Every structure is written in structure tokens, then in C-alpha cells.
Amino acid sequence: MKLQSGNNAIDFTAQDIHGKEIRLSNYRGQKIILSFFRNVNCPFCNRRVHQLMFNNIHFKNAGVQLVLLFESSNEKLLSSSFHRGISPWPLIGDPEKKIYKLYGVEQSTIKMMKTMFVANLNQAKKETKELNLPQDKDASMNLIPADFLIDENFKIVKAHYGKHLDDHIDFNELKAFAGIGNQFKKTS
């Protein structure tokens, strides 16, 4: 079941890649950006994570907590020097997709195929090539990303379910939610 604006966020407890127990409700009182990605090797996902990391200080200064989930295991995520460097944000592997199911994140072959018409796969691969990302042969090919903006009262302000593999909430919406002005660096 897909969640909508106005719904309460669904609490969960999971271990991040460093073995720290993460409970989403522990961030109540802060704004939370909860993002669901595909796998450790997805060029679209890693480009987006790179954009978030590039602007980390702005989110931190605004008091916004990011929580990022991948369908890859914590071990596979930790084997990537790129993913190890995401700290201080919790990065959680969920290969059984238990948390994905709680939030109604979907798998869709049609939306996966749509990606080829609306996104530039070669550009995404080029932008992430130097990251030397590990392979994840257990990952699905058709998991569609999703993002949730959660307010201080643990209410979902916006639930964004991707229309294709490269569809996340626009950075301008993230800025507005975080209360951040124009200090973001331009990202492509």
C-alpha cells in the first residue's frame, strides 16, 4: 500500500552498515528525508547519493536527518568505499525489502523500461564510473526508488514514488522542505 501526505511515518528498527541500531522514531523532532534506492551498483542511485553527499553540510546545518536504504546487503554496501563515506547518515541495507514493503516501494518492469526513454543511462554510468562500485547479482532490476519527507511530528509531508529508475524528489523540493536557501551547489 502506498503512503500519502498526512500519513504517519511507519517506524522501523534496522542496523546500518556500521552495525549501529537505527530506529526511525529516534529522529522525531527533526525533519527526516527517507530515501529508498535500488542497489549498490545502480548508476542512477549512486549519482543521487553523490549529489546528496555533495550538499551534506547544508542539510546538517538545517537540522535535517537523512536515512538512506538500499536493497543490497550491509556487507555489500560496506565493501564500497563510496558507501562507507556516506557517514554521518545512516545507510541501511535491506535485501529482504522488509522496510521497502512497509513503505509501499514497488517493483515494476514497465517503469524500469520507461527509464530507457526518459533517463540517460550512459551519462549516469559515466558520472559514477570512477566510484568503482561493487556488483550485486542478488539485486532486482526493476525496483523503483521512493522518497519521503517527514516532518518533526513524524507526519509524511510528501510521499514520492518514482515513475522510473531515475526519478527522485527534485532538489528544489528538498531545499524547500529543509528550509535551505540558495547555498546548494549546482548539480547536474
Image (cartoon, rainbow, N blue to C red):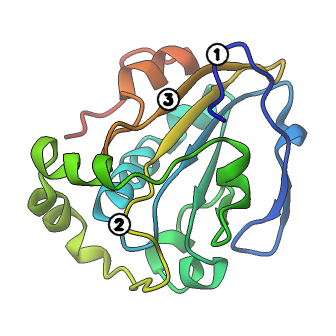
Q: Amino acid at mark 1?
A: Ser
Q: Residue 168 got which mark?
A: none
Give how far across and how far down residue 95 sits, in percent: 63, 72
Give how far across and how far down residue 119 sits, in percent: 16, 46
Residue named by callout 2: 42
Give how far across and how far down residue 156 sits, in percent: 69, 22
Q: Kindly tell me whether residue 183 is visible in this rendering.
A: no
Decide if residue 59 is on the left or right side of residue 151: left
Decide if residue 87 is on the left or right side of residue 117: right
Residue 104 vs residue 184, the one in the foreground = 104
Residue named by callout 1: 5
Q: Residues within 10 Å of mark 1 (few under 14, many from 20)?
A: some
Q: Amino acid at mark 3?
A: His
Give how far across and how far down residue 134 sits, in percent: 40, 85
Could you say which quadrant of the image residue 130 lies in?
A: bottom left
3D distance between C-alphas at marks 1 and 3:
9 Å
Decide if residue 122 is on the left or right side of residue 87: left
Residue named by callout 3: 160
Per the image, label 1 sits on a secondary structure element best described as: loop
Q: Kindly tell me whether residue 13 is visible in this rendering.
A: yes
Q: Which comes before the other along the chain, label 2 or label 1?
A: 1
Could you say which quadrant of the image residue 159 lies in?
A: top right
Give the residue at x 22% y 53%: 113
Residue 21 vs residue 88, the one in the foreground = 21
